[in-house]
Image (cartoon, rainbow, N blue to C red):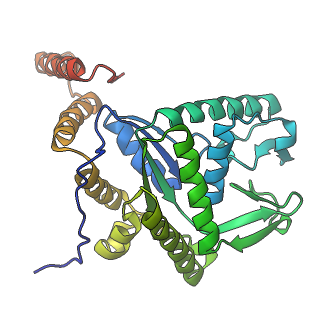
Amino acid sequence: MNLQTKIKLKKVSQNQISYSSKVLLLGSCFSENIGNKFNYFKFRANQNPFGILFHTKAIENLITNAIHKKEYKEEDLVFQNERWHCFDAHSSFSSVDKNAILERLNSRILSTKKQLEEANHIIITLGTSWVYRFEETATIVANCHKIPQKKFLKKLLSVDEIGHSLEMITSGIRSINKNVTIIFTVSPVRHLKDGFVENKLSKSHLITAIHQLLKNQNVSYFPSYEIMMDELRDYRFYAEDMIHPNNIAINYIWEQFIMTWFSEKTISIMKEIEIIQKGISHKPFHENSEQHQFFLKNLEEKIIKIKQEIPFLNFN
């Protein structure tokens, strides 16, 4: 008896992700979930240099600013609730120190350009089609920073607007890295604060725009949203808020991504690294026992062996 409607995934044969790859992840909070998996398995991966970005305009803005090495100045900041904020970045950048936030923004812009230039794979997770326009400057923001909502105009981006933004993203990336593999996906997190119908409309705009892009450009799509909605159609796969995928769901989607984009050799190395990671996190009952010392010696030998194959690995 089959109790799931399974999505058929085809394993890619070219440009697979391996331990020689450099990976950059951009987008919604689900990109952080997957980015944490890359970090756990010790890939050379960076995620969201400007923090979580939910929509295409914010991601487009980051990429454009990075390519042109924008220098952030005081006029790019806004002061609210005794803290300085930047509409281009996540609230985790906000600071009481104006110079501190500017220094961090400008440092990240330069490192983002370097990551875009060097990446073999860029994974972009789109969260929503809804955006907020700051009426004083008529600019679409990445984050409202709890500034009163009356100062913003909420807008649903059309399929054409999203499509144009996606074209700007891909053409911008390829202007400095023509051989990079770009993978789009839609976040399985539902934005129910927008409304149930509004969330469906938002996701459908994203999916339609991405698939129009697939026809015209050499980009790929991974169905994170569809796996959550169709294969994992049960609230046991959700966190307590009934909105975000829980760890079981994140692990399941990650496994499907591995089977699609990773070679068998890479998967084999990941299994070795997982054994080491579990060994490092192991808490002994008797730290000075002979058995534990043997365990530590065996673990160290595993680390030395795998670092001979992949020198950049760091388990500290």
Query: Which residue is at 37% across, 65% downward?
Result: 223
Query: Which residue is at 42% across, 41% downward?
Result: 179
Above or below 160: residue 36: above
Front residue of 204/151: it is 204
- Left or right, 234 with respect to 276, comes to right
Above or below 261: residue 43: above
How many marks do you count on the picture?
A: 0
- Left or right, 305 with respect to 30, comes to left
Where does the N terminus fall, quadrant-wise? bottom left
Q: Is residue 214 visible?
A: yes
Query: Which residue is at 69% across, 37% downward?
Result: 68
Residue 183 placed where, x, y %?
42, 54
Q: Is residue 48 visible?
A: no
Residue 70 falls in image quadrant: top right
Query: Which residue is at 48% across, 53% downward?
Result: 124
- Left or right, 129 with respect to 148, comes to left
Front residue of 165/144: it is 165
Where does the C terminus fall, quadrant-wise? top left
Residue 304 placed where, x, y %?
21, 17
Residue 220 placed where, x, y %?
39, 58
Front residue of 226/236: it is 226
Residue 55 falls in image quadrant: bottom right
Residue 302 falls in image quadrant: top left
- Left or right, 244 with respect to 76, comes to left
Residue 162 placed where, x, y %?
60, 66
